[in-house]
């Protein structure tokens, strides 16, 4: 009984952590923009509900910071005949709200609760995208996955994870280069660190495949071959010509829309000889000199 209770508590913690949006520092001289929050839960959830069978048994999740090259990775993977890598799905903010006394009791009689209903919904979204694309493997590259990887692992015990790293200075530099960005260096570093901490924990915890953006751009064939081997599919040379494939529109909040990514060509990553003291911990941990 004690083991079961521990599992319930862990599930409750995963739900709370996954739904908690990152608190990003506001740009200098501007009021902090409050992130949109998911609907409030009306009561305690019964976490004794078991995990239901999944329609997508082994989805693939990219775990990466913002501005780490995840859109390029998605384009390369989506160019494979068997891999569907759509725009960012933001599953962690797709929620279910149950009415106390009515839908809660009704779903409980079916052996479902709010947590598992959300997982079933997420699973169905992935399955529908596979059906629409006619492919067999789905990859979600939403940067927000870095805040909910524990829940994703819980919901899909057979999920696979691609952990994408980029030099911390490269992330901050890319943040600074976004249009109309007047944030200070301090604010940019603070925003990047919100992602770095859970990313580093995921890197040390998950049994996934770790990639580096710099290596992906410098040796795309080698790195994509490693990814294909990890996913159990044959490598296809057409993956490297991602500009020759249809990846949908470049839309706000659903991925990178820069001229570099729209060029359809893999472009070399910038290199950095120095790292600020604030970022040095992660640069060293991730193998950057």
Image (cartoon, rainbow, N blue to C red):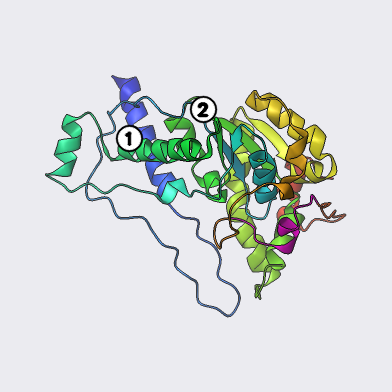
Residue that appears at 42% across and 32% down: 155
As rendered, which of 256 and 82 lies closer to the eye? 82
Q: Would you say residue 260 sits in the magenta stretch? A: yes
Q: Residues within 10 Å of mark 2 (few under 14, many from 20)?
A: some
Of the two numbered discs 2 and 1 on the same chain, state the one appearing first in sequence. Answer: 2
Q: Is mark 1 on a helix, strand or loop?
A: helix
User: Residue 249: which quarter of the image?
Assistant: bottom right
Q: Is residue 239 visible?
A: yes
Number of marks in picture: 2
As rendered, which of 90 and 134 lies closer to the eye? 134
> What residue range appears in magenta?
255-266
Left or right: 285 in relation to 18: right
Residue that appears at 60% across and 47% down: 197
Q: Would you say residue 121 sits in the magenta stretch? A: no
Q: Can residue 12 be seen in this view?
A: no
Which residue is disc 1 drawn over? 116
Left or right: 94 in relation to 152: left
Point out the frontmost of discs 2 and 1: 2
Q: In the picture, which quadrant includes the N terminus?
A: top left
Q: What label does residue 58 carry, if any?
A: 2
Residue that appears at 61% across and 76% down: 28
Answer above or below: position of 275 versus 183: above
Q: In the picture, which quadrant includes the C terminus?
A: top right
Residue that appears at 20% across and 36% down: 107
User: Residue 259: which quarter of the image?
Assistant: bottom right
Residue 90, given in percent of the width and then of the height, sits at: 48, 50
Q: How crowded is mark 1: few (under 14 residues within 10 Å), some or many (20 or more)?
A: some
């Amino acid at each position: 009984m004690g083991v079961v209770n521990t599992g319930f508590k862990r599930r409750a913690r995963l739900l709370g952590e996954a739904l908690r949006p990152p608190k990003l520092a506001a740009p200098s001289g501007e009021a902090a923009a409050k992130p949109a929050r998911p609907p409030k839960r009306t009561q305690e959830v019964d976490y004794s509900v078991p995990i239901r069978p999944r329609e997508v048994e082994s989805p693939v999740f990219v775990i990466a910071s913002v501005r780490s090259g995840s859109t390029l990775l998605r384009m390369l993977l989506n160019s494979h005949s068997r891999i569907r890598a759509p725009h960012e799905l933001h599953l962690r903010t797709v929620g279910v709200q149950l009415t106390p006394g009515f839908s809660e009791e009704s779903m409980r009689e079916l052996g479902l609760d709010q947590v598992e209903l959300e997982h079933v919904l997420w699973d169905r979204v992935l399955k529908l995208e596979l059906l629409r694309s006619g492919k067999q493997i789905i990859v979600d590259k939403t940067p927000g996955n870095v805040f909910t990887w524990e829940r994703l692992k819980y919901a899909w015990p057979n999920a696979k994870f691609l952990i994408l790293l980029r030099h911390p200075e490269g992330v901050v530099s890319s943040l600074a280069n976004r249009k109309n960005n007047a944030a200070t260096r301090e604010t940019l570093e603070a925003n990047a660190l919100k992602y770095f901490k859970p990313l580093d924990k995921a890197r040390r915890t998950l049994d996934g495949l770790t990639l580096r953006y710099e290596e992906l751009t410098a040796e795309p064939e080698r790195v994509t071959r490693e990814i294909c081997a990890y996913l159990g599919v044959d490598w296809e040379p057409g993956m490297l010509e991602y500009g020759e494939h249809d990846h949908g529109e470049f839309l706000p909040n659903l991925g990178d829309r820069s001229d570099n990514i729209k060029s359809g060509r893999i472009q070399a990553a910038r290199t950095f000889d120095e790292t600020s003291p604030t970022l040095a911990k992660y640069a060293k941990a991730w193998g950057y000199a």
